[in-house]
Image (cartoon, helix red, strand yellow):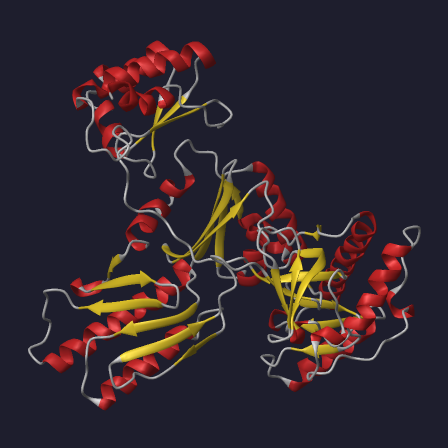
Amino acid sequence: MKSELIVDVTPQEIAIALTENDRLMEVNREKRGVDTFAVGNIYYGRVKKLMPALNAAFVDVGHEKEAFLHYLDLGSEFLTQQKYVTKLVSDRRRIPEIHKIERQPACGKEGNIADYLKVGDTILVQVTKEPINSKGPRLSAEISITGRNFVLIPFIDKVMVSNKIGKSAERGRLKQLVQSIKPQGFGVIVRTVAEDKRVAELDNELRVLVKRWEDCVKTLQTKEPVSLISEELGRTIGIIRDIFSPNFESIHVNNKEVYEEIQQYLELIAPESSKLVKLYTGEQPIFDKFDITRQMKTGLGRTVGFKKGGYLIMDKTEALFSIDVNSGSKKLFEDQEQNAFHFNMLAADEIVHQLRLRDIGGIIVIDFIDMDDKANQQALYDHMRELMDRDRAKHNVLPLSKFGLMQITRQRVRPAVEMEVMETCPTCMGKGKIQSSILFTDKLTEEIETYRQQYGRGLRLHLHPYIYAYVNKGCLASLKTKWRMKYGVHTIENQSLGMLETKFYNRKGEELTNINKDEQNKAPEKQK
């Protein structure tokens, strides 16, 4: 299977698309320049209130909604960690060594959070689930530093090996090896990808993880409560860390800084694969170049088609995500039972694809086409389980109910990916009336001239594919040629734009302010 990663870097966000055999499988978006309270971020928070009924506390970490911390998420060595943090912030001249901290009694599984925390206490916590809808972040007080081969856990002092490593000899080798190279006072979880890895590679990564913890501690000494202590690696690096495999064919990036960052990380975890990273320098938007924009617009709508003319209706509610399977007007077999079974099996493939693409979590209810044959119901259930086994997110699939409904629970750690596939007319702003369309190019020419006077030549004008085709009509006599010769403006096709939407960029790729936008918005008010 050919896997590719396409990274689109803009001033506002970083969008990451994962493709398998040129089919879009996952899309992640990460805002730039703001705290997104991403999974893995570490905060120095303050307890705002205790909820004895829930056996939990609400902690202020800087988000508009207070974060949730359950008793079971305190961790067994919570008291030891609290003593270390207290000692660290009380004496900012030196950093105490973890293994020299006096061990405190472990927190049992049965306990009351009020016995360990009170309102006003400061606490070191880590985000385990991002803010979703009206809910704040979910926290854990058991800090972990995640790498590709290891998870480093301070204060635990144990070595645990993934159960997915089946060979007992390899499990023993890894446990003995890690036990000999890890520092005192740290616990390590050996991940599945560490199987058969060389000693030097494992030792190098462990040193990097320990260094990240030490940096976190140094930052904590300089910070006041309710502040960010350590930010998780960027979403790009995180995805590469979790899904990177020899099947990766290339990683395309349109930003030099991020390109170098990814290269450095790959040199750390897989030096032979660092050549896979390629810097994209084309003028066409990178998502358009690799057919990502089209697949997002066709695959993220309410109605999603699949093979043989069938389609899905996907609706989100507060409680669950519902998916309705329809065969459309086509009938592949005369027998209704066979026809329903065939479309249900095809729908299952697309449903699993949609769950990954949109990163849908929580409760998912699927209304398949009714089938009476128990064997067909079992075959569909087995097929769905087989498809879901490829999903990295934790999940549970239940058999079809007597009403023909299948229930799935899927781990939800961040908001689902959403994209507005319906476009608002940029000229009427949804009011239903526009200026004469024949005047569009005249108005655009005036706008080009204004931009040229303000910013000079060499500008890039992005247009919808239909408009781009129109201005390119006529070769030497085309508007595209005239604009380039007279104003020094280069026109570029951009699939993400609305029909009459335009965007201007300078030589550096920075988006320029739409000069006439305010005038367009004020025009209806003048008419009133």
The quarter of the picture where residue 467 lies is: top left
Q: Nearer the viewer, residue 258 or 95?
A: 95
Quadrant where the image shows the C terminus:
top left
Query: x%, y% of residue 446?
Result: 31, 13
> Taking 410 as reference, is 435 left or right?
left
Which residue is painted at 85% across and 70% down in the image? Answer: 184
The quarter of the picture where residue 321 lies is: bottom left
> Taking 269 as reference, is 22 left or right?
left
Query: x%, y% of residue 180?
Result: 82, 74
In the image, farthest residue toward the bottom: 374
Query: x%, y% of residue 334?
Result: 6, 78
Is residue 359 depicted above or below 53 in this figure?
above
In the image, farthest residue toward the left: 334
Query: x%, y% of residue 461?
Result: 37, 24
Quadrant where the image shows the N terminus:
bottom left
Is residue 202 depicted above or below 424 in this figure?
below
Is residue 51 depicted above or below 293 in this figure?
below
Q: Nearer the viewer, residue 150 or 234?
A: 234
Which residue is painted at 40% across and 58% down in the image? Answer: 358
Q: Is residue 446 visible?
A: yes
Which residue is painted at 24% across and 89% down in the image? Answer: 375
The quarter of the picture where residue 178 lies is: bottom right
> Taking 291 as reference, is 226 left or right?
right
Which residue is painted at 82% across and 47% down in the image? Answer: 222
Q: Is residue 147 visible?
A: no
Q: Nearer the viewer, residue 19 or 119?
A: 119
Is residue 293 depicted above or below 182 in this figure?
above
Q: Nearer the viewer, residue 478 or 222?
A: 222
Q: How many marks?
A: 0
